[in-house]
Amino acid sequence: MRKIVYSLAVAALLWSCKPSENIVSNITKNEVEVQIDLNGIKDDKVMVTVVPPAIKSEKITYHIPKIIPGTYSEDDYGKFLENVKAYDAKGNALSVAKTDDNSWTISDAKKLAKLTYWVNDTYDIESTHDIFSPAGSNIEAGKNIMLNTHAFVGYFKEFLDVPYQVNITHPATLWGATSMTDTDASDTKDIFTVSRYSELVENPIMYSKPDYTTFTVNGMEILIAVYSPNGIVTAESITPEMKTMMTAQKNFLGKFNSTKKYSVLIYLSDTSRNDAHGFGALEHPTATTVVMPEAMPKEQLAEQLKDVVSHEFFHIVTPLTIHSKEIQFFDYNKPKMSEHLWMYEGVTEYFANLFQVNQGLITEDEFYERMATKIANASTMDDTMPFTKMSSMVLQKPYKEQYQNVYEKGALIAMCIDIQIRQDSNGQRGILDLMQKLSNEYGTKKAFDDSELFDKIESLTSPEVRKFLDTYVAGPTPIPYDVYFAKMGVTKAMTKVTGNAFLKGMEPNFSINPATKEIFILAGSEKLDFYKNLGVKDADILLEVNGTKYNLDNVYDMIMGSLTWKENDPITVKVKRNGKEMQLKGNIKLPSEEVEGYQATDASKAKLKEAWLKG
């Protein structure tokens, strides 16, 4: 999972069929059959019908996940189910008792012929819950259904390992983008079959008007599907950058085995209305779900997609290939977390940056700048909390407040291990080599015990790597990053960083009058280079930028647009000062500051550094 942070009456199920009608019997089938009706959407709710195999017990419990792999948060997807009903083969209602937010127990279960319920979506009510948007759901009749399967379909523990057949009826105008294979030839019904519940959970589907491209990279078929509610972005418009990125990833991974088909499902949120605002992506073995703001300029969108989609794609290495038993036998409602988030998220995030300098997508200096930013971000977290303990306890306080550090310190842990392996092997091997060997040792079908991983890594690398793991990953000692950079001939240096015209860090230099929705410049901001160069004064009301009107309703679009501005480009700003409108013209002057970063300074280590970044 990769998050991006920017600041800033119930429909009732009516039973009207005759006793023997519309009941699907699964007595002779050892599979769970699911029917999802996208034609009968009511109040943004979808009807789901579940037909289980023959049940031998007097009671059985149906569960919707509390948590899913990759999110590391308890989200209680069962809260979005309504009117859960159970029926026998004659249409008689059976007793259903809700035992917790995510569980329903059916009495007289031997007679259970089907279970029905309505599913509400999460995107348009995100202020009421904390579900990360790419793991949530959207239901807009005739427009878009983001069908993350875990939010719609649950499981009986007794049938976790039996096949699931999912039948989805939908308007002919909507097409389902997914890595699964539809075995129904009609354009109004899809049939998907998977081997077990966990496979279904890992296969999201996005229904919308068809807007997709496909291409092949080293034998892997890539599907790029886009939903842009206002038609601003198309799959075709972003495919060149995606193809360049994913080709570079495959080249970086080399012989690492992967799936034959991979889907990138991109939902672009309309931030001017109640819509998804948890931006980022969620990984699956053969797919990534992405949520981004539709208003983001294409150039900036392409950059963000490069970072977040590459992160999710690299999850095919870990935990999707290399993982512990906690991952292999994931409990959706009573999860036990692994100690090794430093590997699952940290190594993944490191690869998402390393491959870009390795394949020439960013410069060496840009790579150092990214790592320096991660060091700065990690320094704001608890640097003495053992990473293994934080990982295993990540669902509880105070550990869950440190989760964001998996993308910061987690990536830096991976970098230091990479450097140590390069030094030990005189540049011949790195952390990618380690991950390839771990993949050969374990792979998708074989999980490791949490307690054995460090021993295994030591046997594949060196005692120095084991010492690092014990001291800085399992122990409370902060990592001396300068020492590890120096092994590659890289030392601290001051570097110039360009900022944003409207933000310093995450703080804006303007505010908004809630009564009028007008944007006004904060006191002291007129001294900033951007405003000073244009003649903007404190308390000026900002009306337009380059001919586009802005206020509270679309201020987010203004910030997104500014992310692609270039120094000295012409700009026109309209302001209101003391009741009088004024048009100010000039060139963009972006803020910059000297920050502590890193540069290669030791020529004697140049060959080793080259092996690290380009090997």
Image (cartoon, rainbow, N blue to C red):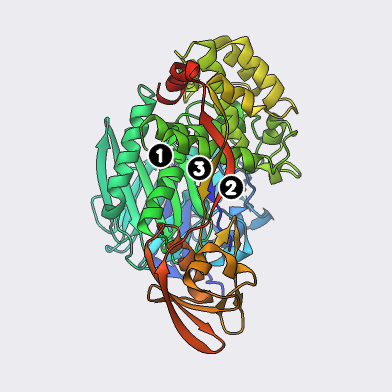
Question: In this orientation, does residue 98 appear?
Answer: yes
When the figure is inspected, residue 342 is found, relative to residue 28, above or below; the finding is above
Picture coordinates of residue 155 (x, y %)? 54, 45
Q: Amino acid at mark 3?
A: Ala
Chain-order first, disc 1 or disc 2: 2
Question: In this orientation, does residue 437 appear?
Answer: no
Q: Residues within 10 Å of mark 2 (few under 14, many from 20)?
A: many
Between residue 150 and residue 548, name the one nearer to us. Answer: 548
Q: Residues within 10 Å of mark 1 (few under 14, many from 20)?
A: some
Q: Which mark is residue 71?
A: none
Secondary structure under tag 3 reads loop
Between residue 403 and residue 185, name the one nearer to us. Answer: 403
**Which residue is disc 3 drawn over?**
54
The reply to whether dot 1 and dot 2 touch (C-beta < 8 Å) is no
Residue furthest toward the bottom?
Answer: 579
Q: Residues under labels 3 and 1: Cα distance?
A: 19 Å
Q: Residues under labels 1 and 2: Cα distance?
A: 18 Å
Picture coordinates of residue 117 (x, y %)? 52, 60
**Which residue is disc 2 drawn over?**
65
Residue occupying the point 56% across, 33% down? 411
Q: Is residue 137 left or right of residue 465?
A: left
Q: Which mark is residue 194?
A: 1
